[in-house]
Amino acid sequence: MTVPLPRLLPMAPTGSESTRLAIVRGNSGSGKSSVALAVRSHLGRTCAVAAQDVVRRTILKERDVPGGVNIGLLSTVARYALDSGFHVIVEGILHAERYGDMLADLVADHRGRTGVYYLDVSFEESLRRHATRPQAAEFGPEHMREWYREQDLLGLAGEQLIPPTSSLQDTVRRILAEVFDQQHKRDLGPADSVALGSAVRQ
């Protein structure tokens, strides 16, 4: 028996003029998780991170397929947090062909300020970083090649591409300033300050 794919319900405006939304996307190993967690570390309990891997892999244990349940659930998590007064960072690979419509709706519906960022890293660098991560035992270069998209932009107004020469610290400072009206009050450690193009953490 074929089970029909779930359809996203029409959404309503979300958040408020005072809530902030940052969408941080990129290929595996681009630094998106490190950026999201560093921004949240600065903001503290006022900020929620809606991570694609947590929703898709940990909560649902779902494959990344068109029309996947995780797409709607990720939107619901982000919207619920925004409606509860939290700032939100949505982070993940979030391929445009599968997640683009959901993300475009989320951006359009958010009442407050929104920043959309894509962390640009080459496939060769993605492979190099993956070899240093715990996930290296779970999937290899073949899967990495299948997932990789070069500059997989959403095409939204104001979307910004972060080059691989931008350090983690600079990227965090940029997002804090542009989206959250915050200045980074402390320097990151040496291991966190390397360029995103040569960092080893996702």
Image (tube, helix red, strand yellow):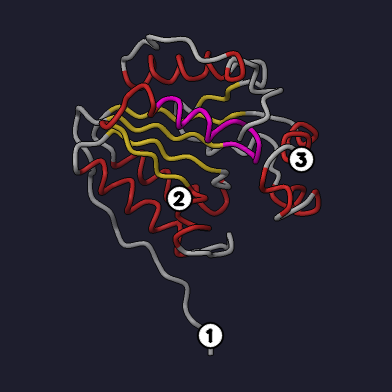
Q: Nearer the viewer, mark 2 or mark 3?
A: 3
Mark 2 packing: few (<14 Cα in 10 Å), some, or many (20+)? some
Q: Which mark is residue 2?
A: 1
Cβ–Cβ below 8 Å for labels 2 and 3? Answer: no
Q: Which residues are magenta?
A: 26-39
Can you identify the residue that label 3 sits on? 131
Q: Which mark is residue 83?
A: none
- Disc 2 on helix, strand or loop? helix
**Left or right of 7: which side holds 25?**
right
Mark 3 packing: few (<14 Cα in 10 Å), some, or many (20+)? some
- The relative height of residue 11 versus residue 120 in the rendered view (above or below) is below
Label located before the other in sequence (2 or 3): 2
Mark 1 packing: few (<14 Cα in 10 Å), some, or many (20+)? few
Can you identify the residue that label 2 sits on? 101
Residue at image coords 67%, 48%? 135
**Left or right of 182: which side holds 202?**
right
